[in-house]
Image: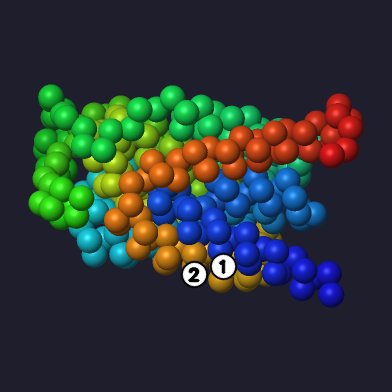
Amino acid sequence: MDWLMWVLALFFMTLGIGIVAPIAGVGGGVLFTPLTMAFYPFSTDFIRGAGLVMAMTSALSSAPHFAKKGLANLRILAPVVIVSIIFSILGGIIGLWVTNAFPQGKSYIKIGLGLILFVVFLVYLFSKRVEFPQIAHIDPISEKLDIHGMWYEPSLNKVVEYRTTNLLYALPAFAGVGFIAGMFGLGAGWANVPVLNLVMGAPLKVATSTSMMIITINDAAACWVYMARGAMLALIIVPSVLGITIGARIGARIAVKSRPKSIKYLVMAIMLFAAIMDIWKGLHGLGLAPPI
């Protein structure tokens, strides 16, 4: 009956992640992958493959609701996913190569994941996200592509119109995010949102919603790399998909009416805890730390 215990544990964990993910603008993989590596006895390859599926599933469950409300912007989505897809596939290939080419590759991946999570934690800690950024200048590329949008904002009781800028600076950032997402199975919402909001000037709700749309395409590409290498395990994926799908549908409805800041500190605490646990387990695998 051990398998049933793991199935139930994964279901309830991913149910909670699914609720939190759309509110925070993350795909779910950034929480699922480090927590599962830290507390479950599965191979890192299976966990990273499942992490991408979780990110994609939570995004697919919530993105249609955001698109219906006019929050997810397809004009932003089109240029950035072209870059992020290529680098997410590359990241997945290199990530699987590391775990198979080096005797202690799995420990290196765990330590690398922990360090990445520390960076994510710092991004959340120090980024001053702006709900309605003021754009002084629109770059020529964004102007030519006519990247703009509007949505009805219940808290202001009016339709909000906006434009974005700095696409030339955003594209290299999305390339790096795509690579990390594919390599560590994290999804990409943790970095999509700051880039969309702080670099491109998209309103915070538009940034979190468009982030979920980007994840649906970006992570689907990386998933094929793990699937082709046999790094998908039904015991992990099936209960997790069920949990995160139900949770994400609940979270999407909460996100439309709530302020994303309300969930920020919970997400930060989970990331910091998972980062410490993953680094410790990685160091233990290298014989540099005692067991937890």
Residue 255, above or below 263 = below
Q: Nearer the viewer, residue 39 or 112?
A: 39
Amino acid marked by disc 1: Gly
Q: Quadrant of residue 147?
A: top left
**Is disc 2 in contact with disc 1, using a CB cutoff of under 8 Å?**
yes
Q: 269 or 244: which is nearer to us?
A: 269
Q: Which residue does the image show at 42% across and 66% down from the upper left?
A: 249
Which residue is painted at 49% across and 69% down in the image? Answer: 246
**Whole-Å distance between the Cαs marked 2 and 1?**
6 Å
Q: Is residue 148 left or right of residue 93?
A: left
How far across and how far down the image is residue 112, in percent? 66, 33
Number of disc labels: 2
Above or below 69: residue 142: above
Determine if residue 178 is in view: no
Quarter of the image with the N terminus in it: bottom right
**Residue bearing the label numbered 1:** 243
Question: Label 1 crowding class (10 Å Cα cut-off): few <14, some 14-19, many 20+?
Answer: many
Please provide percent x and percent y for residue 201: 23, 33
Disc 2 is placed on an element classified as: helix
